[in-house]
Amino acid sequence: MLFYEKTLSFISDLYKCVAGRVLCQLQACGAADVNAAVRSASAAFTVWSKLAGMERARVMLEAARLIGKRREEIAEIEVVNNGKSITEARLDVDSARLCIEYFAGQATTLSGQHVQLPGGSFAYTRREPLGVCVGIGAWNYPFQIAAWKSAPAIACGNSMVFKPSPVTPVTAVLLAEIYSQAGAPEGLFSVVQGGQETGSLLCHHPSVAKVSFTGSVPTGKKIMEMASRGVKPVTLELGGKSPLIIFEDTDLENAVRGALMANFLSQGQVCSNGTRVFVQSSILPPFLKEVARRTKAIQIGDPLLDETRMGALVSKPHLEKVLGYVTQAKKEGARVLCGGEPFIPADPKLKDGYYMTPCVLDGCTDDMTCVREEIFGPVMSVLSFDTEDEVLRRANDSALGLAAGVFTKDVKRAHRVIENLQAGSCFINNYNITPVEVPFGGYKASGIGRENGQVTIEFYTQLKTVVVEMGDVDSLF
């Protein structure tokens, strides 16, 4: 179900980032629409929460089947709006489908605990749904995030009102359509469009039980503050400035591939990216040579072509912001090994799109802006280190702690380093691998709670304790 306020005066242009042209105009939802969406979600919750887990699972599995059937359609729409390559967009659709399948299985296994008490009495716990949940998505993974938030919520018996980013609002509507076609009650997953004002209305709504947000740290803090006024739990998946540590004993070719995956997926617009690449000094020269060679070979252009590996950044202001970070890095003493410039594809239809060449910065130091701040673009900052203790201290010197990675052939060192890294999602000899079966989320200012994995059930349910007396009341009065 999609809600929108036809009479609202605020209208924003939705740009086709691959070509720099207006794709359509978006009307934001106002208070009347938000109220209608929450009412519809409340009605759906009344029905949905009473279904057996197996009944909810059937609907979810049908939704997953429909996503698989419409994979290419959804991926192509994601490309047009978001700008990422069709190869990556297909993987995003697959992740969404797998997430819904996984939590369909979890819906059938929700259970509590039985505790035997003295005298034959006993107690038990029940995991019960929260009610109407709000999901607020980001623009880098529009369809995938909508699925990652909705799947655990509805598996537990909740309903969800979802607000996608106003920059990429389209594919969440397709997910709502698919849930409806799969047999979900009307209002179980509703989409409202808009920006900050619409999000504020959702967070403050008295009938909303929980808010789950993916986005920047400053916005996450505001959402946490708004939700706290209603004592509502939040799940926050926020920014990162993650370290990737490459030791001298590693397979260099494998480490270079990992560094590229850690920096250039989705044009570098990934919160978990390992953009602080720490390379042990003894292998720094060959690493730089190979990473620059492979970065220069990345094919940029029309993201709808299978051979393209890097599409357009999401908007013109964002492109200018990322290019500004490269300029600032040069002013602070970093050396550009390659890239960091606007790119104009050969296809004249794409000449006004928001493209840039992926950038590798050498000679970076811990105090540089490019090392301290999240750029959210295809910019890799390479730093040299000598010892394990040194690199651990430097890697943890950040207010953020979303992800971290290590490349080494020494198994003991790998686990020792991971144990001491202050990050919620860690990788050994790989990077940016996010199977839906395992939790994803951060330490420190990178967020609260987790997406995916069995533990997510805890964030979309509330625990009820029931004590059953089998004898007489032993009263003090």
Image (cartoon, helix red, strand yellow):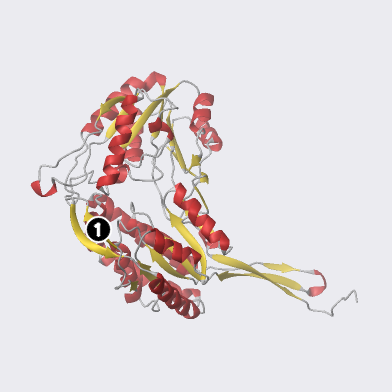
Q: Quadrant of the C terminus?
A: bottom right
Q: Which one is in front, 433 or 240?
A: 240
Whole-percent x, y for residue 390 in the image: 51, 24
Give the residue at the far top of this rendering: 282
Whole-percent x, y for residue 20 in the image: 18, 50
Whole-percent x, y for residue 385 in the image: 45, 23
In this picture, residue 419 sits left or right of residue 73? right
**Does the image show residue 105?**
no
Whole-percent x, y for residue 225 in the image: 53, 56
Per the image, the residue denoted by label 1 is 14
Q: Quadrant of the N terminus?
A: bottom left
Q: Is residue 170 above or below residue 474?
A: above
- The quarter holding residue 26 reads bottom left
Give the residue at the far left of this rendering: 348
Q: Is residue 71 above or below residue 257?
A: below
The residue that appears at 41% across and 20% down in the rendered structure is 281
The residue that appears at 40% across and 61% down in the rendered structure is 197
The residue that appears at 45% across and 66% down in the rendered structure is 202
- The quarter holding residue 264 reads top left
Amino acid, disc 1: Leu
In this picture, residue 451 sits left or right of residue 183? right
